[in-house]
Amino acid sequence: MGEVAYDLLTLPDASTRLLRQEGAALEFVHVESSNFGIKPAENRITSPFNMATVEATGHCEKVGMSDLLAGAAERLSGQPMRLTACNYILYDLDSFIGLHTDKPGCEVNVLVLLAGGPSAAEVRPFRRGESVRDLLSLSRRGNGLVDGTTLIPLTGPGSAIAFRATGVPHQRRPPPHPLMLLSICYGPESANGD
């Protein structure tokens, strides 16, 4: 199995509290899809999902531009990065997101656990000689979810993982308890014409 480069991070309690309060005050929208797809030019796979989400507001941008998170994104990518998106995500006992890679502009994703019990990020790197079509086939067999993943623990509110989201397929199975997460995306500064 391929190596996964990632950083485990812990947000300050005050930042976690502000983000949790911000997320709790927003109106989430349920999103669901049963579609599978690939974009071979981007080496990208999409799979079914079922969750609730909402775009973040002010606090996410402040936290996302902090040295802690923006620095992790730049270390992982090896280049200057800019914050491109912040989204709160709610997972209940039936929620999941199938195996996928993120779209360009989210080369690095920082996934922060804000509320709920311990959880894990679930990654499944490409294996030697494996194509995006091979992963799509595996994903279809498991209705979007595959076995043989690596679990990276998120131990409690404020724990986070930064990883290369366009290059490392990842998924989330239905959790044993409701979760609130924050997904912060970073893309290369050069993609913004800088």
Image (cartoon, rainbow, N blue to C red):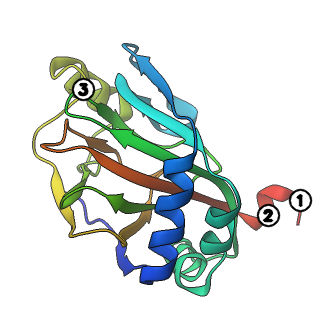
Task: Tell me how far mark 2 sits from mark 3, CA to CA.
Answer: 33 Å
Q: Residues within 10 Å of mark 3 (few under 14, many from 20)?
A: many
Residue 154 in percent (x, y) is at 25, 66
Q: Residues within 10 Å of mark 1 (few under 14, many from 20)?
A: few
Q: Which mark is residue 62?
A: none
What kind of residue is marked 1? Answer: Gly
Residue 108 is at least partly visible in this image: no
Task: Tell me how far mark 1 sits from mark 3, CA to CA.
Answer: 36 Å
Where is the N terminus found, in terms of image quarters? bottom left
Task: Tell me how far mark 1 sits from mark 2, CA to CA.
Answer: 5 Å
Depth order, front residue of 129/10: 10
State the residue at coordinates (38%, 61%): 114
State the residue at coordinates (44%, 43%): 89
Residue 9 in percent (x, y) is at 38, 79
Residue 96 in percent (x, y) is at 28, 33
Q: How many marks?
A: 3
State the residue at coordinates (25%, 43%): 178
140 to the left or right of 58 = left
Q: Quadrant of residue 139?
A: top left
What kind of residue is marked 3? Answer: Ser
Q: Which mark is residue 139?
A: 3
Q: State if disc 2 and disc 1 touch (CB < 8 Å).
A: yes
Q: Which residue is mark 1?
A: 193
Residue furthest toward the right? 193
Where is the C terminus found, in terms of image quarters? bottom right
Q: Earlier in the sequence, mark 1 or mark 3?
A: 3
What kind of residue is marked 2? Answer: Ser
103 to the left or right of 154 = right
Q: State if disc 3 and disc 1 touch (CB < 8 Å).
A: no
Depth order, front residue of 4/69: 69
Q: Which residue is mark 2?
A: 190
Depth order, front residue of 151/131: 151
